[in-house]
Amino acid sequence: MLKNYFKIAYQNLRKNPGYSLINIGGLGIGIACCLLIFQYVTFETSFDKFHENGDDIYHVSWHRVQNDGEPSINASTGWPVGPALADETPEVIRYARLHPEYGSALISNPNQPEKTFKERRIYYADSAFTQMFSYPLVSGNPERALEPGTLLITQAAAIKYFGSEDPIGKTLDVRGWFGGDFLFSGVVNGILRDVPANSHLQFDFLLPMADLFQNSDYNNPSTGWGWNNFITYVQLRHGSDPIEVDKKFSEIYMRHRQEDFQQSNVKAYVTSSPLMDIYLDEDLPLSNVAKGSSSSVYFFTVIGLITLLVALVNYINLATAGALSRAREVGVRKAIGAQKSQLVFQFLCESALTVLLSTILGFALAGLALNPVNSWAGVNLTFALWSNSEFWGTFPIIFLVIVLLSGLYPAFMLATFRPMEVLKGNTGTSGAGMGMRRGLIVFQFSISIVLLIGTIVVFKQVNYMQDMELGMELEQIVTVPGPGLVPEGVNKGNVVETFTQELSNLPAVLKVGTSGTLPGGGFAFGTNGFKKATADQSEEIHASGTSIDTSFVRLYGLEFVAGSIKNSSYSVPEGEPARILINETAAYSLGYDTPSEALGEELSHGRVVGVLKDFSWSSAHNAMENIIFYLSENSTNISIKVGATDLPQTIIAVEELYKSHFPGNPFEYAFADEQFDQQYKNDLRFMRLFTAFTSLAIFIACLGLLGLVTFTARQRTKEIGIRKVLGASISSLARLLSSDFVKLVGIAFIIASPIAWFLMGKWLEAYAYRIDIEWWMFVAAGIGAVFIALLTVSFQAVKAALMNPVKSLKSE
């Protein structure tokens, strides 16, 4: 019997190839979309799950509350925090601190000088790091990992620096930190397996924390608690209560910083974040690690489910649209004794066959689309989901649910046809059944319009961020990092100054300036102790800053609202405070009524010689900050304003000068505007994926609409013939068939608009600088939906209107 059911199902698919193709194709595209989205979601939610001790590892953050205000979170801590928590908390088994190599370091193989590269994936780590985390060694002794004077490298780094040689026991020179003043020569005593892509920590080199502490800046325990440069992890005893542990951590932290905090009227508390939550925790401002977006994962999970749901609704509409052609078959079967349950089961078997073919097509389309989607959207989708035993364990259940959702309604509708009625040609489907199908079309287009409005909002927000007025000029600026390596006995500041002077002599170079960090690349430091020199510590506020030279302001087109700078601003008599610039926001935050009042004032970080008009150093996600610029001639990031003509030759000339002044240093350059826009990489990825899946969801909805207009045209065949005999024109008949669907789209628009307004308003809250949701966005989406609907139904409507009226009147 089951074999016969599937045989009949196969014959029906072959008998209506066009209908079958649309039906299988629409559902297949929906399944492919869902698979791609869940590939993305699976990857994003898989971060750090490979660690054996992952359930017991926590990241430590501390929260600062001043004057009973709003708490600010610090995801990095001082270096004594880890040891203190381990010593004073019984639940802590071990701790591990990481110190990122801020910026980049120059690493070289001393036996092969040509093997010199700039590297950014570097951490200094405690020896306990390899015991806590599951980054396995493929070569070397784990007992000696991260001993002083040694380092660990990944397999990729081993090939890069040593080729086919065995790196164990060989030396690498690392020059970095503080602009190249710290040199570390280490012996490779271990090779790590390459770090998985789903690790929030991404590195190629691990250096011993003990060697970092030889630097004098970390020799003073009294200042260690306030240097928030370290990422601290603790491993708790299995079964420990994190809430109780956090209370103990907070008591320890307050006790060690009590004197400092009392003067500043600050309270603090400590929170520990589970390791597997770090990647998607958008409230955890952890830099120098891979970070994702929980809201993006949520959005795409919903879009994936909605796309599949739209495809199922589309299938139901197409199945019911084809019901008329099966009505007589059902009537005959029921007349010769077929039971309702047998008919339902038969049609469910047909649904199962269709879903099976759609699933095969969906997997094929998802596999073919994987690489193009990765390239276009900048994501890292893999086939990992398909090799997951849990996925295949639940897939039969998912398949069964899809079969039931897509097949039950059409099966019951067909099975309830009355034999005498359908053999007379009357299916009795004009009432509740038609209402159901119209409701499904409204549902589909409501979703489509929400996604269409969302696409417009996302597109406008991303473009607004990229085009917003920054208060600085980034065009035609080439940036070059300073040297990581200079010959022994050579003053790096002097050689950089000579290089910048010679750059200025190049015909295409308009201006040259230096800075500690670059726009869009964060600041060199952040401080909670920014205040007037005479103010009480309780008045301290947060500020961020970096160093710049006197040419930087003019080069980037920054504007003074008070004061000015000259080259002599570098010169500071002994005992005098440093010369600094601040922005308007900082001046007002400090309590000055006008920026001019801040001129000449001594602050905790120096004397103000100028106040700059507010400018955007960071992305539109962040509100305007209090900014400090130290005037210094020792900054090593070089910015070059160049002319627009013959840019390739200018780059070649800059490279030649760079290599002549800094031999042994790899030459790298970038454009300031492109570097700044790198902050919006995740937003661009979100926009592209959102647009792609919205387009596919709308396409699938249009297939459903096509099914309903086909059904309607067949049902009204006789009416159309009579109208044509009575003189109705083709255009009036096309309007007659199309008008009902335009009304359905109008209803969908009314339902979708407030939903889209609420959802996109929530999404925009993540941006400090954001667009307003305007009325024209809804009008554009509504017009777009009507146009798409008319385009979909017009062909079938015109086809029905062109039908020979004689044939129409013989339809019964």
Image (spheres, rainbow, N blue to C red):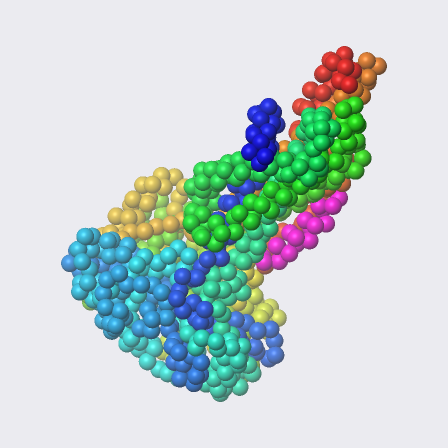
Most foreground residue, 549 or 755? 755
* Residue with the most extreme right position: 726
Most foreground residue, 22 or 294? 22
Q: Main secondary structure of the magenta part?
A: helix
Q: Quadrant of residue 53?
A: bottom left
Residue 158 at x, y percent in the picture: 24, 57
Q: Is residue 756 magenta?
A: yes
Q: Residue at x 43, y 77 (%)?
A: 237
Figure check: 737 above or below 246: above
**Number of marks in picture:** 0
Q: Residue at x 26, y 61 (%)?
A: 138
Figure check: 28 above or below 730: below
Tell me which segment is drawn in magenta: 750-767
Q: Is residue 181 visible?
A: no
* Residue with the most extreme front position: 337
Figure check: 774 above or below 623: above
Residue 245 at x, y percent in the picture: 50, 79
Q: Quadrant of the C terminus?
A: top right
Most foreground residue, 734 or 351? 351
Residue 720 at x, y percent in the picture: 78, 20
Q: Residue at x 47, y 64 (%)?
A: 276
Q: Quadrant of residue 632?
A: bottom left
Instruction: Say whether residue 454 is left or right of residue 131.
Output: right
Residue 410 at x, y percent in the picture: 68, 37
Q: Is residue 722 magenta?
A: no
Instruction: Say whether residue 743 is left or right of residue 678.
Output: right
Q: Quadrant of the N terminus?
A: top right
